[in-house]
Image (tube, rainbow, N blue to C red):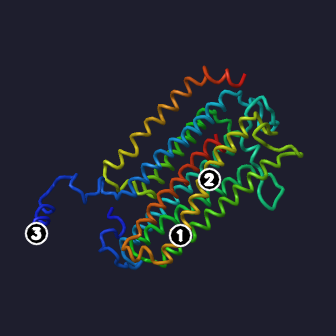
Amino acid sequence: MSHSSEGHAAGQYVPDTDPASVAHRKLIWKTFWILFAITSFEFLIAFTKGPLGLPSLLVIVVFVSLTLVKAGYIVAEFMHLRYEVKALIFTILVPIIFVIWLIVALLDEGHAILPKWFN
Amino acid sequence: MSATATVISANDTNLWGGGVEPMKASYGKLMMWIFLLSDAFTFSALLVTYGMIRFSFPAYSGEVENFVFSGSYWPIPEKVFTHFPFTHAELPLAFVGLMTFILIMSSVTMVLAVEAGHRHDKAAVEKWMLWTILGGICFLGSQAWEWSIFISGVDGWGASLKDNPYGPPAFADLFFFITGFHGTHVFSGVVINVIIFYNVVQGVYARTGHYEMVEKVGLYWHFVDLVWVFVFTFFYLV
């Protein structure tokens, strides 16, 4: 998608009726409605998981997945990362591997460390 | 002399020759991204710590209706955060839902300010930045209200770093640290937004010819929203 009015000459005023601008703002609001819908769905699960007796592991997996989808939309659209060059996208996303390593390591090592602190 | 320089810049494909933006992003924008990456590590560490400590305590195993606060298991968040301003009704998680909505909304107004900046529409940038600042202030006020309810507690016994009426001491500690660290980011964001808004009104960016500062502060502001999405899930939902 051609994006925004970045192609216009520097310093030049462009009215908000400009087709590229209209399309861009439509995309912004679409992203908002997606985020809103996902959050509403999360609330729905939060209040029906008890009565429906949903298994807690399933609920956690659903919550975490939906959170990652929301994060994806914020980073890709609002923070505009989707439209940057590939090198920048990878510069930001690849180091997140270390966070995954941190989660795996601490979930595994946690059993060994924590009892000494809290018991 | 100038002729030689022109020839070199026209033919030189050396990326290290200067005047080229690596990754087609300006220095400031690139460094904002790198800073946000490092900040993401900090927040990840805090949230992973939360998960690790939380699951080192037993979960409440009985029926949700019969839940009572106890120091021997982790509390159910929807039993802790039930208050809403101007009513005594129990509305689990409603207030944090409102806070989430405010922050997402302020992210939308921020990105609209950035869009207006690309069009050099000064009036629209001012309008949307003002809404963003307002959203940030509303969020901070909400958080202050939630902290005060959390601290004043139940039946005269409130939460501190030492102990709390809801669950193990670590529960309140992590609540204060994580929402406090996020709130500090929101506060910084509001302050920076106010400074940039002032510059916009003063016409600083109309003179420099671009509104990239709005874009950079926008990146920071969306990051604050991004972190809240995770705090919301791990602190209030799971």
Label 3 is found on which chain of the structure?
Answer: B
Q: Which residue is mark 1?
A: B129
Label 1 is found on which chain of the structure?
Answer: B
**Dot 1 amino acid type:** Met
For the residues labelled 1 and 2, the Cα–Cα distance comes to 19 Å
Residue B89 drawn above or below residue A16: above
Q: Which residue is mark 3?
A: B3
Tag 1 and tag 3 share a subunit: yes
| In-front residue for pair A45/A110 | A110
Q: Are marks 1 and 2 in contact (CB under 8 Å)?
A: no
Q: Nearer the viewer, mark 1 or mark 3?
A: 3
Residue B138 drawn above or below residue A95: below
**Dot 3 amino acid type:** Ala
For the residues labelled 1 and 3, the Cα–Cα distance comes to 45 Å
> Which mark sits nearer the N-terminus, 1 or 3?
3
* Residue B203: image tag: none
Q: Secondary structure at mark 1?
A: helix
Crowd rating for badge 2 (residues with CA inside 10 Å; few <14, some 14–19, many 20+): some
Crowd rating for badge 3 (residues with CA inside 10 Å; few <14, some 14–19, many 20+): few
Q: Secondary structure at mark 2?
A: helix
Q: Residue furthest right?
A: B155
Left or right of B100, for residue B65? right
> Which mark sits nearer the N-terminus, 1 or 2?
1
Give the image location of residue B89, x and y in percent.
82, 55
Q: Which residue is mark 2?
A: B184
Label 2 is found on which chain of the structure?
Answer: B
Q: Nearer the viewer, mark 3 or mark 2?
A: 3
Q: Secondary structure at mark 3?
A: helix
Crowd rating for badge 1 (residues with CA inside 10 Å; few <14, some 14–19, many 20+): many
Tag 3 and tag 2 share a subunit: yes
> Which mark sits nearer the N-terminus, 3 or 2?
3
